[in-house]
Amino acid sequence: MLDANPPRRDESPRPEPAAARAADRPVRIVVVDDEPPIVDLVVGYLEREGWSVTTAGDGPSALAAARALEPDAVILDLMLPGLDGLEVCRQLRTFSDAYVLMLTARSEEIDRIVGLTVGADDYLTKPFSPRELVARVKALLRRPRSSGAASAGPGVPAHGLRIDEGRRSVAVDGREVELTVIEFDLLAALAREPGIVLPRPRIFAAVWGDDDFADDHLVDVHVANIRRKLGDDAASPRFIETVRGVGYRLREAR
């Protein structure tokens, strides 16, 4: 639930995340919501972290801000004038790899699934705790945008699937596949241990960098998105196998 007492702006900011310091600039976040009280509250908490925050009150303004600022993360309300949050997220994914945390007053499961399907990385339903929102953004920002690690062997096993972690590229039978940042990180986590079953909590910790807010459903939806993009069939998997009640594993090449 919303905290009616946002932090004072004159409080000393906490140290910036390592990713921001490495880039020699503060983390950039765009907050998109058409409710000024919520915007003011969220901005107060984000600025306390030393982050640079820009706001937008409608869909077109959100896309313009994202193009101009190249933000690290976008906090995106679902219900917006001009363009709704789902369409903003779809368009955003055509030119930006910013992490997207979607806010919605809708509690139905289908709304959360659709949001993740169009490219959101995480979600919160209103009313929400601003402190939890900050914690979730921190968890997303801890994910590296580029891993210098090489893939596990030439091409990584799994029958025509090729993953290059250094270039963050994926191909199936020579066809390039476009994945979001979170989708790539999840697939890479599975690929580092082909044939080994990874429980959902372990996948969550590997991809989101924190298991304080572990959400099995979030893992399941992102796996479904990856399968769709790879052309994989959950009923007869070529790449990702489901181990009921436990988690997932990437099939080994034989």
Image (cartoon, rainbow, N blue to C red):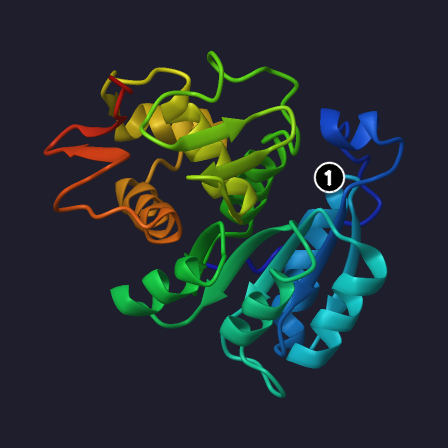
Quadrant of the image containing the C terminus: top left
Name the residue carrying label 1: 49
Q: Residue at x 61, y 77 (%)?
A: 35
Figure check: 171 above or below 253: below
Q: Quadrant of residue 95?
A: bottom right
Q: Position of residue 225 (x, y in %)?
A: 36, 52
Q: Quadrant of residue 106?
A: bottom left
Identify the amino acid type marked 1: Glu
Q: Residue furthest right?
A: 24
On the rendered structure, is 61 left or right of 193?
Answer: right
Q: Residue at x 66, y 29 (%)?
A: 146
Q: Residue furthest front?
A: 174
On the rendered structure, is 233 left or right of 223?
Answer: left
Characterize the local packing of mark 1: few (<14), some (14-19) or many (20 or more) Cα atoms within 10 angstroms: some
Q: Nearer the viewer, residue 113 or 213?
A: 113
Q: Residue at x 78, y 44 (%)?
A: 51
Q: Position of residue 243 (x, y in %)?
A: 14, 30
Instruction: Tell me if residue 7 can be seen.
Output: no
Q: Residue at x 70, y 80 (%)?
A: 60
Q: Nearer the viewer, residue 122 or 165?
A: 165
Q: Judging from the image, what secondary structure is the residue with disc 1 in?
A: loop
Figure check: 147 above or below 92: above
Quadrant of the image containing the N terminus: bottom left
Figure check: 194 above or below 247: above
Instruction: Tell me if residue 238 can be seen.
Output: yes
